[in-house]
Amino acid sequence: MAAADSPSTKPTRRRGSGVSTVYETLRNEIIDLTLAPGTPLEENQLSERFQMSRTPIREAILKLSADGLVTTLTNRSTIVSQIDLMDLSSYFDALTLMYRVNTRLAAEFATESDWERLEQLQAEYADAVERGDALAMITANREFHLAIADAGGNRYYRDLFKRLLDEGRRLLRLYYISFNDQIPREYSDQHEDQIQAIRNRDIALADQLAREHADQIVAQIQRYIAQDRRHNIPL
Amino acid sequence: MAAADSPSTKPTRRRGSGVSTVYETLRNEIIDLTLAPGTPLEENQLSERFQMSRTPIREAILKLSADGLVTTLTNRSTIVSQIDLMDLSSYFDALTLMYRVNTRLAAEFATESDWERLEQLQAEYADAVERGDALAMITANREFHLAIADAGGNRYYRDLFKRLLDEGRRLLRLYYISFNDQIPREYSDQHEDQIQAIRNRDIALADQLAREHADQIVAQIQRYIAQDRRHNIPL
DNA sequence: GAAATACCTCATGTCGACACGATAAGCGTT
DNA sequence: AACGCTTATCGTGTCGACATGAGGTATTTC
């Protein structure tokens, strides 16, 4: 029964791997702006690209849809979700709040191993800053903040924070572009201060730092967008 | 081409309706505890029940999984998610915070039409309380609070709030059971006070009321669970 | 020449079937 | 009799094909 006649035609990836492969690949491409907002995702095309049937593709797209990363028009193609500038204030508001509550919880509940993980991730971040590697910065930054959320231990806050960081990674990209991929040293140092506050279980200070950190990022992005918009005003 | 030979064999629901039908049906059954936590969901069985292929079933289950309502074990059956009592404090914490921020935003930004909608929903809620109809209470209560979130206008807060209300509807069920499906009048009145605070744009008061409302529900559920647990202590 | 209409194209929604993995059962061995 | 191995069974993961509905296009009419 083992019709192993043509092993070449069967790369036979592991059984349940199809969906997650497609999901993670597309997710990264969307977040890194490799796939621009508005880009249509055709199942057939993806099917050919990933060398698998439409079924896993479909399920991956469904997951992306649940994450809000793609928008699916019924009976019509699904496209990469737009970054809508209308909701920016909502976004910044939520991001700031999640920064704060997660940092507060981390200051309250983080354990020694959490501290170590934070310092390790911060080291990676600092290294990326040193090298001027924007992609690495974004990744490390995300990991750093997610680690804070993990240390805080609230699943719901963590999930929303993750969503905000992911959905906003496209915005964050703007943030780094606005510095020409060179983050001033002081911004990186903010992370260090946060770690210290968390270690000292100084909830008030941690909250304050988180708030400042968020405000700073928000202000920077807003400045960039305002500037960018000026160029796009149609006359 | 129109092979309408056997119209009886083709009830032919509308094209894209399959997934959402299954999704909403199962979702309600899970939330109403008709499907107890741990119940396995077999695709074949559901396929037969809903009279459609496994594909739409599969996609519906995937959406439920994204909502955290079901847990899928790879290559193994998917089951209705457990209500894990470990995360209760996280849950209550997040619920309280979402109560507060959404109510604050509503107090700040709600328009006249929002007020009207709130009063209408509150009337429905009061009516359900009057009749002692627990299911209607839960539904109306959910609608009421979601309306507040809508009035607040922050998509991210709204979505998390919705998730909390849904995921917690199973818990909320306990809340109502603890009153024997009879909500004391004063709790219902809290809604009225909230509407007033929102209308008066009294953010501080709205926040205070939201906090008290949430605290109250949390305390009640915790009391119920503590009581319930005492019976289950194994010796 | 412009608008409305009918047709055509094509991506999605749905279907039935097959393959693989994992558990459960049956068998043989020590 | 207990343990390990082989085999049966079941459900998921994946596949290719068909049906359907929504745009786009060409044609026709005013």
Image (spheres, coloured by chain):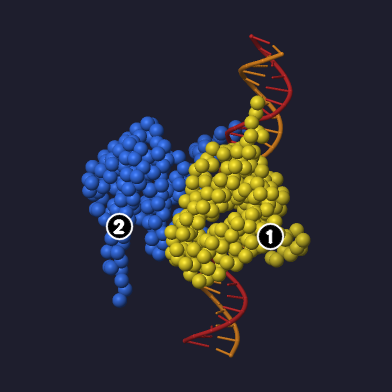
Chain colours: A yellow, B blue, C orange, D red
Q: Secondary structure at mark 1?
A: helix
Residue B82 lies in what quarter of the image?
bottom left
Q: Is residue A25 left or right of residue B178?
A: right
Q: Secondary structure at mark 2?
A: helix
Q: Is residue A20 visible?
A: no
- Which mark, by number, is residue A1? none
**Chain for numbered disc 1:** A
State which mark lies toward you, 1 or 2.
1
- The residue beneath circle 1 is A130
Q: Please provide percent x and percent y for residue B73.
A: 52, 62
Q: Please provide percent x and percent y for residue B29.
A: 40, 51
**Chain for numbered disc 2:** B
Which amino acid lies under the numbered mark 2 shown in the image of this protein? Ala
- The residue beneath circle 2 is B219
Location of the N terminus of chain B by quadrant is: top right
The residue drawn where x is 68% and y is 53% is: A182
Q: Nearer the viewer, residue A181 or B14?
A: A181
Which amino acid lies under the numbered mark 1 shown in the image of this protein? Glu
Residue A116 lies in what quarter of the image?
bottom right
Q: CA distance from mark 1 to mark 2?
A: 50 Å
Task: Note whether B215 is above or below A108 in the view shown.
Answer: above
Q: Please provide percent x and percent y for residue C28.
A: 59, 83
The residue drawn where x is 59% and y is 45% is: A221
Callout 1 crowding tier (Cα within 10 Å): few <14, some 14–19, many ≥20? some
Co-location on one chain, circles 1 and 2: no
